[in-house]
Image (spheres, rainbow, N blue to C red):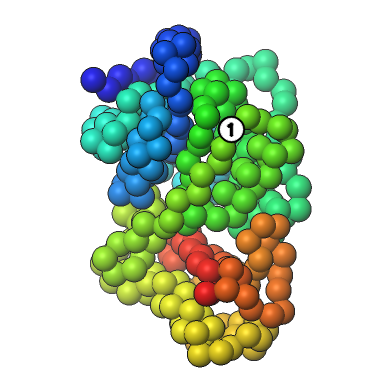
Amino acid sequence: MSQRIDGHPYEMIQILEHQRREGNTIGFVPTMGSLHRGHQALVEASRNDGNFTVVSVFVNPAQFGPNEDFDTYPRDNDRDFELATAAGGDLVWYPDVADLYPAEAQTSVLPGDLAAKLCGVSRPQFFPGICTVVLKLLNLVRPHQTYFGEKDFQQLAIIRRMVADFYLNVDVVGCATVREDDGLAMSSRNRYLKPADRDIARTLYRTLQAAKAAFAAGERDATALKTQLTEAWPQGLELDYLAFREPEFLNEVTQLEADTRLFLGAWLRGIRLIDNAAVG
């Protein structure tokens, strides 16, 4: 029987201590709620690894800018509990803001160069907010493994770097992007899209597919391919970035390799869209 815990983490910590004494490993999927099939795939990956699986649902105020959608971000805790448990979650925790950001707290995490590119340029508060809350969550849950989707690949790379830099005893597992039937990467913000906007939003997926096709055909010049893809970008979709990067430190490349990733960020009527994939 799956358990739901609202608020203070004390009860959760006691349950997880019991699981460790029983010899069970802990898997952890941190989310901001508004769960979808992509989140469920993370929960299933943890269960398939044999873990007692914890899902947290917390809309983190620290990662939103002053003009972003914190107040309107979709929230449905009962539905999230149903989806998390249907995927195999054993415990779903809903911390309050005061649990993770008590009034006396003063310390936050300042990530380095990995956070100063791609999404970090237009959203400078985003990755410090993510790192701070993820470090708090990992210290409270103390999982053996934690699961993040490759759709937010920059976030995944930053979390891996933070875990290594702070010698945290947890394995960060990246899971493949889950897509809608039309190729659009699953995202909680997709529900903001009007039916007429979906084909425009699919530009990101089509661009990734075009890059893969060019690489398969022998293209290795990253600058030339970037120019080609940028020139084909449609009006009405505001391009934030289109960049070929290596997968560990996300440095720009001039020559494409199989593991080079194309990163895309855009805005459509104020809705944030991101996607990425390896070209090989």
Q: Position of residue 175 (x, y in %)?
A: 45, 51
Which residue sits furthest front? 23
Q: Classify residue 44 by image quadrant.
A: top left
Residue at 44%, 36% in the rendered image: 29
Q: Position of residue 38 (x, y in %)?
A: 36, 50
**Residue 195 can be seen in this image:** yes
Residue at 31%, 54% in the rendered image: 191
| Picture layout, residue 262 above or below residue 32 | below
Q: Position of residue 229 (x, y in %)?
A: 54, 84
Residue placed most toward the observer, 217 or 7: 217
Residue placed most toward the observer, 235 or 249: 249
On screen, residue 197 versus residue 113, left or right, reads: left
**Residue 35 can be seen in this image:** no
Q: Position of residue 12 (x, y in %)?
A: 43, 15
Residue at 55%, 23% in the rendered image: 142
The residue carrying mark 1 is 170
Q: Amino acid at mark 1?
A: Val
Q: Classify residue 186 by image quadrant.
A: bottom left
Residue placed most toward the observer, 90 or 77: 90
| Picture layout, residue 33 above or below residue 115 | above
